[in-house]
Amino acid sequence: MSDPRELYQQVILEHNKKPRNFGKLEACTHHADGQNPLCGDEIELTLLVQAGLVQDLKFQGHGCAISQASSSLMTTAVKGKPVAEAELMIEQFREMIRGTLDPAKDANILGKLSLFRGVKDLPSRVKCAVLPWVTLHAALKGEETASTE
Ligand code: FES
């Protein structure tokens, strides 16, 4: 498993099949619905933010394997983190997908999320990967809706 593309494929498939933190929080402090208008796919994100920490979060909705895996990995990466760290992760993930941050060279806190770096070369999948991240950004700002456009 030394080929990053092979690892990427495996992680995407695995998280799509068994998404982590799937569902909806009964008691949440933040909520947003995100949509990719190009395909109509949607996710709903619920968060519990207390004492400056993202204590818990869940997502649900429908979408392609990349959007589901990106949502699943995002929730595992952000859960338990300070809000400021979550915001930094959002920024760095988007920079990586735009190609302005190279996780192999530039300092970052992306960890396993850097598996998505190859998406920058797949223009048709960029919005799939960023859908949960724009939704998280909206939710943390107190906005109820988000769009990849
Ligand atoms: Fe709709 Fe990927 S095809 S989010």
Image: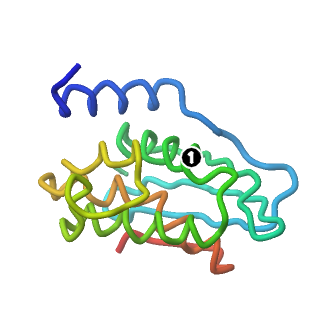
**Percent position (x, y) of residue 35?**
47, 63
The mark total stands at 1
* 142 relative to 69 in the view: left or right: right
Please report the residue visible at 30 percent of the width from the left and 42 percent of the height from the top. 115
Q: Is residue 140 above or below residue 133?
A: below
Quadrant for residue 110, please give it: bottom left
Quadrant for residue 124, please give it: bottom left
Looking at this view, is 116 or 101 the one in front? 101
* Quadrant in which the C terminus is drawn: bottom left
Please report the residue visible at 16 percent of the width from the left and 27 percent of the height from the top. 3
Looking at this view, is 148 or 81 the one in front? 81
Give the labeled residue for mark 1.
Answer: 61
Please report the residue visible at 61 percent of the width from the left and 56 percent of the height from the top. 44
**Percent position (x, y) of residue 45?**
64, 57
**Percent position (x, y) of residue 80?**
70, 52
Q: Is residue 111 above or below residue 97?
A: above
* Quadrant in which the N terminus is drawn: top left
**Percent position (x, y) of residue 125?**
24, 52
Please report the residue visible at 83 percent of the width from the left and 68 percent of the height from the top. 51
Q: Mark 1, residues whose alpha carbon is within 10 Å: few (<14), some, or many (≥20)? A: some
* 100 relative to 64 in the view: left or right: left
| Most distant residue in the right direction | 27
The colour scheme of the drawn protein is rainbow
| Most distant residue in the top direction | 1
Q: Is residue 66 above or below residue 105?
A: above
The answer to whether the residue bearing label 1 lies less than 8 angstroms from the nearest atom of ligand 1 is: no
* 116 relative to 34 in the view: left or right: left
Helix, strand or loop at disc 1?
A: strand
Disc 1 residue type? Gly
